[in-house]
Amino acid sequence: MATLTARVVPVPMRLGGRHIIERNFLLYKRSWVVFLSGFTEPVFYLLSIGIGVAQLVGDFTLADGTTIGYAAFVAPAMLASSAMNGAIFDSTYNIFFRMKYAKLYDSMLATPLRPWDIATGEVTWALLRGACYSAMFVLVMLVLGLVTSWWAVVALPASILIGFAFAGAGMALTTFMRSWQDFEFVQLATIPMFLFSATFYPIETYPGAIRWLVEITPLYQGVHLERALTTGTVSWSLLINAAYLTAMGATGMYIASRRLGKLLLK
């Protein structure tokens, strides 16, 4: 009589976040129209405000005396804003649904995946998605002649850094959300940042105290970074902006992984 023997196949203890990236890619592969919509919004903003209004505003003079057109002034701010919005959308609404309703992360944690793997996988996916949008937006800027410096080659990595900052922070904040109504606070934070982070006019137009308040907001760090790179007004102070965004993203990822462990591994 033949004897059946079972062989145990070892499973890696840490699969890593790459499996979450693969899962999200397969999901959006069938919804490419939804994926593409994140690119069209900032382009429409650029065409309507940056180019349409530019005929009425005229040229802008930067702090170092450099004169650029209004469209070239607004475009890098749109690039930074699109990186923020894409990262926030992926790391808040989508993650909240997967965590609270689909119970996707409960299933993942039944495998060798750990909370840190989920955090890194979701944030990395948000960065890859944002990088696609940013790359296409930079291409539009080049076609429209809105790039005046070779430093613009670093604009894409800079937008990925902006996405990392907001994706980490967004995921961390999502772990504290109790219902969909709590996301009103996300809009309460992102919309004023979009409007007032020197997006449509120079920071010098603000009075002293308000200007200081704007300069410490995360989106202003990204707008200042992108604008300096695309206009060639580069200085060592940009390292402070980069360090700010890096610390923001890393702290957010750490909090998110700890919170996921606390919420799901009870």
Image (spheres, rainbow, N blue to C red):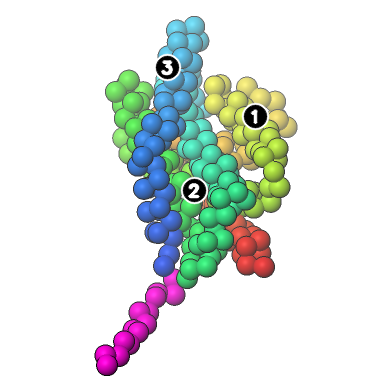
On the image, the x and y values in percent for residue 204 come to: 60, 25
Q: Secondary structure at mark 2?
A: helix
Q: Secondary structure at mark 3?
A: helix
Give the residue at mark 1.
192
Q: Nearer the viewer, residue 264 or 187?
A: 264
Badge 1 amino acid: Pro
Query: What residue do we see at 35% from left, 84% from top?
Result: 6
The vertical placement of 52 against 226, above or below, is: above
The residue stretch that appears in magenta: 1-14
Q: Nearer the viewer, residue 252 or 264?
A: 264
Give the residue at mark 3.
47
Q: Is residue 4 magenta?
A: yes
Q: Quadrant of the N terminus?
A: bottom left
Badge 3 amino acid: Leu
The vertical placement of 120 against 126, above or below, is: below
Query: What residue do we see at 46% from left, 14% from top?
Result: 48
Question: Distance between the Cα atoms at labels 2 and 3?
Answer: 26 Å
